[in-house]
Amino acid sequence: QVQLAESGGGLVQAGGSLRLSCAVSGRTFSSDSMGWFRRAPGKERESVASITWGDGRTYYGDSVKGRFTISRDNAKNTVYLQMNNLRPDDTAVYYCAAKAGWRSTYNYWGQGTQVTVSS
């Protein structure tokens, strides 16, 4: 029904920037939300940011607030995560996820893209 494809990961030095993209195929609605999650080695999955398609309402995890920015291009069905001032503890596999407005959890997931921040 819905397919997600992340891109833009890579290796960057501490203090650098990366922009992740998530291309969405399938029908989306204004009440639906898109989110970015990450999983670092040996750690649990962490919510990074989310955005609602319709009104652009955003959420940020405390650890990235002020450094990361989530945005979306409705016409292109694409969600972005601009990551600035990256730190080594940002190193993780980053996943794009989708959630219908009526759902309490995300049920569509991309394959992930690796972000590595060197010290």
Image: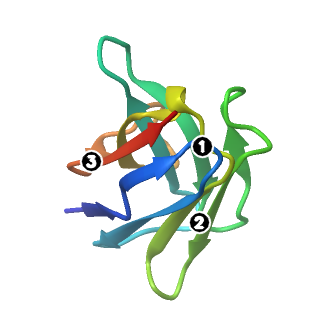
Is 110 left, or right, of 13 in this rendering?
Answer: left
CB contact under 8 Å: marks 2 and 3: no
Circle 3 packing at 10 Å, graded few (<14), some (14-19), many (20+), is: many
Is 107 left, or right, of 88 in this rendering?
Answer: left
Q: Amino acid at mark 2?
A: Trp
- Residue 99 coordinates in the image, percent (x, y): 43, 47
Q: Which quarter of the figure has residue 65?
A: top right
Q: Nearer the viewer, residue 91 or 52?
A: 91
Q: On residue 112, which mark appears?
A: 3
What is the spatial separation of the Cα atoms under label 3 and label 1, in whole angstroms? 15 Å
What is the spatial separation of the Cα atoms under label 2 and label 3, in whole angstroms? 21 Å
Q: Residue at x 51, y 88 (%)?
A: 75
Instruction: Tell us which disc is closer to us: 2 or 3.
Output: 3
Residue 94 visible, this angle: yes
Q: Amino acid at mark 1?
A: Ala
Q: Residue at x 37, y 13 (%)?
A: 43
Q: Nearer the viewer, residue 28 or 13?
A: 13
The furthest residue to the top: 42
Q: On residue 49, which mark appears?
A: 1
Circle 1 packing at 10 Å, graded few (<14), some (14-19), many (20+), is: many
Q: Secondary structure at mark 1?
A: strand
- Residue 62 coordinates in the image, percent (x, y): 72, 27
CB contact under 8 Å: marks 3 and 1: no
The furthest residue to the right: 66
Q: Amino acid at mark 3?
A: Gly
The quarter of the picture where the N terminus appears is bottom left
Residue occupied by mark 2: 53
The furthest residue to the bottom: 75
- Residue 40 coordinates in the image, percent (x, y): 36, 24
Q: Secondary structure at mark 2?
A: loop
